[in-house]
Image (spheres, rainbow, N blue to C red):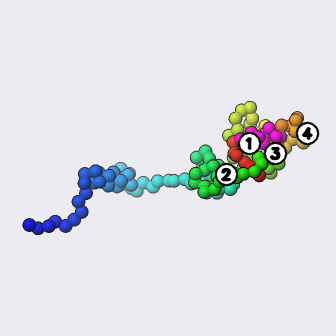
Amino acid sequence: MSKKKGVSLGLAAGLALFVLALGLFSLQGTPVVAQVSTETNCTNGLDDDKDGFIDCFDTDCKCEPPKGTPCSPGYWKNHLTAFNATCVQVPSPWTCPALLTALTCKGSDANCKRSAAAAALNAISGCTE
């Protein structure tokens, strides 16, 4: 009686291997490249990978959300990249121009609503200083 050498796969394992190989190639026989997007900067106040989560709130980032007092109106006025990334997510009645007008207003806070604008932005971003 002779022994056969080789690898024997069960039906389930063979099918899994076939599906895996099929998944790596398109019908035309060219490789399929999966594009995985990850957060590229965990401190810039932006949703770099467009998954709806900013910085430490993104599971791609290995950090804890910052702790401290909520970001001030001055923070938002002086960090326009973070402002622009966040203002579009603030619900009505706020708009990006209205938020920026409130933050840069030179009158009293009661008239300008600087604190309310900053609070609306902080609610979305979780920003703290």
**Alpha carbon separation for disc pair 3 and 1:** 9 Å
Residue 65 - label: 2
Looking at the rendered structure, the secondary structure element under dot 1 is helix
In the rendered structure, which amino acid carries the disc numbered 1?
Answer: Leu
Q: Looking at the figure, which quarter contains the N terminus?
A: bottom left
Which residue was labeled with disc 4?
107
* Label 3 secondary element: helix
Q: Around disc 1, counting alpha carbons within 10 Å, would you say few (fewer than 14), some (14 to 19), or many (20 or more)?
A: many
Q: Earlier in the sequence, mark 1 or mark 4?
A: 4
- State the residue position of label 1: 121
Between circles 4 and 3, the one closer to the viewer is 3
Taking depth in this image into account, of 99 and 110 the one nearest to the observer is: 110
Real-space Cα separation, disc 4 to disc 2, in angstroms: 33 Å
Percent across and percent down for residue 120 are 74, 39
Residue at 78% x, 39% y: name it: 117
Residue 53 within the segment the image draws in magenta: no
Name the residue at 75% across, 51% down: 68
How much space separates mark 4 and mark 3, taking CA atoms? 13 Å
| Lower position in the chain sequence, tag 4 or tag 3 | 3
- Check whether the beta carbons of the residues at disc 4 and disc 2 lie within 8 A of each other: no
Q: Mark 3: which amino acid?
A: Pro
Give the residues in magenta.
114-123
Mark 1 or mark 3, which is nearer the start of the sequence? Answer: 3
Residue 102: image quadrant is top right
Amino acid at the residue labelled 4: Gly
The residue singled out by tag 3 in the image is 73
Residue 59 horizontal side relative to residue 93, left or right: left
Between marks 4 and 2 in the image, the one whose residue lies nearer the viewer: 2
